[in-house]
Amino acid sequence: MEYNSSREPLIIAEYGRNVQKLIKHILTIENKERRSKAAHILVNTMASLHQGAKDFSDYKQKLWDHLHAISNYQLDIDGPFPTPAKDDSFKPETLDYKQSQDLKFRYYGRNLEQMVKDAAELEDNEAKVYMVAMIANTMKKLYLTWNKDTVTDDIIKDHLRVLSKDKLHLPDDFVFEDTTELVKNKPKVFKTRNTGKKKKYKKKILNLSL
């Protein structure tokens, strides 16, 4: 059995290991005409693996460029495009995944925390009052969607204060939007007779617009 740890690393993972092996085989073909013909066939195969590439005007050239890149630019063939210079630009950039541990309250999400941060920097005016009210109502909906069946208004007010580092406060007479229907339509949980395991039955999908 062949394990991944003993295999060569994939140069462009999206084409898979078989394409890389076929390119390696093409390198061993001594006759340039046969080598070129095999390369044309393989590029068509690569195109069939990624139909979405056809949305781009230069998709054919990119396929040939990737073919040469996977061969480590050692492929001597007669292709429709000039052999590209050695370049690593085809490799995707490493994504910087932010850890969820730095979120104060995960059920609100990173986008809402950013909204709170932006609102805290606004000047005191009517637009800020409206934005803070919208954020507070969104927080309550998110809390009810992903957390408990009920939540007091004081909890949302306190969370808003914490997220804004004590810069945003709701007035004592602030009235939240009615969430009765939201609580009423939360998925119900029932226990099965035999196993006692919980099963969730979703009555309908809730659409919340942030």
Image (tube, helix red, strand yellow):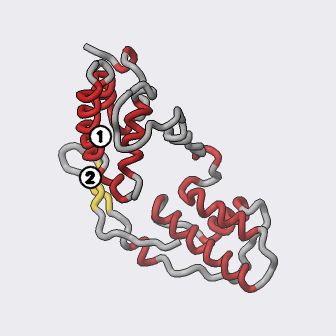
Q: Position of residue 179 (x, y in %)?
A: 48, 76
The kind of secondary structure element at disc 2 is strand
The kind of secondary structure element at disc 1 is helix
Q: Earlier in the sequence, mark 1 or mark 2?
A: 1
Q: Position of residue 23 (x, y in %)?
A: 32, 27
Evaluate if marks 1 and 2 touch, with contact meaning CB atoms under 8 Å apart. Answer: no
Would you place residue 17 above or below residue 162 in this image? above
Specify the quadrant that holds the N terminus. top left
Observer-nearest residue: 105 or 110? 110
- The mark closer to the camera, 1 or 2, is 1
Location of mark 2 (residue):
191
Observer-nearest residue: 73 or 174? 73
Q: How many marks?
A: 2
Please state which amino acid type lies under the numbered disc 1: Val
- Measure how far apart labels 1 and 2 are at the Cα level: 55 Å
Q: Position of residue 71 (x, y in %)?
A: 40, 27
Q: Residue at x 66, y 61 (%)?
A: 114
The answer to whether 1 appears left or right of 117 in the picture is left
Location of mark 1 (residue):
43
